[in-house]
Image (tube, rainbow, N blue to C red):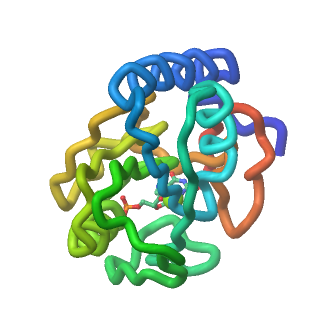
Amino acid sequence: MSELQVVCSEQCIRSAVERLACEIRSDYQDKNPLLIGVLKGVFVFMADLVRSLNMPLEVEFVRLSSYGYGRTESSGDVKVIHGLESGIEGRHVLVVEDIVDEGRTLDHLLRYLNEQKPASLKVCALFNKPSRRQVPVNIDYLGLTIPNVFVVGCGLDYDEKFRYFPDLRCLDD
Ligand code: XMP
Ligand code: MG
């Protein structure tokens, strides 16, 4: 499977993460932000981002689902499978996403989090596929915009495969 075409190189992704960390660090100094990652795909980006940030912060994870196994299209029916373990009222919350595609997952998550009255709620996403958007969502800190192809690597999977690629690759149908 090494023939899958590279969409973003490791170096390009590393530069994007460092740029995002600089922006976030200057905006969240002395705020002890709570970074909420969307599993599973975000685990690689979250680890890189937190180490780049190198500042006081806390981390939580949620898990949402709308993609069935072996599918590259969202079912459109988003559910929170694993929610927050502690409250976020009064916290400065930064949602960390691997990729925003149709926007349904993020829209659903932001509604769920907003109900819990955080002091602020912003979004950081490593990859964005704006050409696929169905629901408008605002991304405050964006890494890289990519074309309308299904991508794997850097934590992203197809049917649980290929998460380990250090770069982002296009999955040929
Ligand atoms: P929506 O469409 O709701 O989806 O914005 C966001 C979630 O869908 C997954 N996703 C992908 N996963 N390659 C993947 O491996 C892709 O190209 C892709 N596009 C969307 C991902 O879990 C994301 O959080
Ligand atoms: Mg995801």
Classify residue 150 as left or right of residue 123.
right
Give whichever of 47, 3 is nearer the camera.
47
Q: Is residue 134 left or right of residue 62?
A: left
Which residue sits at x=55%, y=50%?
Answer: 58
Q: Which image quarter: residue 167?
A: top right
Front-most of 9 and 26?
Answer: 26
Q: Residue furthest left?
A: 136
Whether residue 144 appears in this view of the structure is no
Picture residue at 62% right of the left edge, 25% below the top:
52
**Viewer can see residue 16:** yes
At which x and y percent is residue 75? 39, 79
Residue 44 image-quadrant placement: top right
Question: At x 59% / y 34%, what residue is drawn?
Answer: 49
Question: In screen coordinates, is 88 left or right of 50?
Answer: left
Q: Is 97 rendered above or below residue 54? A: below
Quarter of the image containing the C terminus? Answer: bottom right
Percent across and percent down for residue 145 are: 38, 31
Which residue shows up at 61% across the image and 44% down it? Answer: 46
Asked if residue 64 is positioned above or below residue 50 in the image, the reply reads: below
Please state if 54 lies on the left or on the right of 108 as rendered. right
**Labels in figure, total:** 0
Depth check: give the residue in front, 122 or 107. Answer: 122
Residue 91's x, y, as percent?
Answer: 34, 55
Q: Is residue 143 above or below residue 47?
A: above
Picture layout, residue 68 above or below residue 17: below
Question: x%, y% of residue 144?
Answer: 44, 28
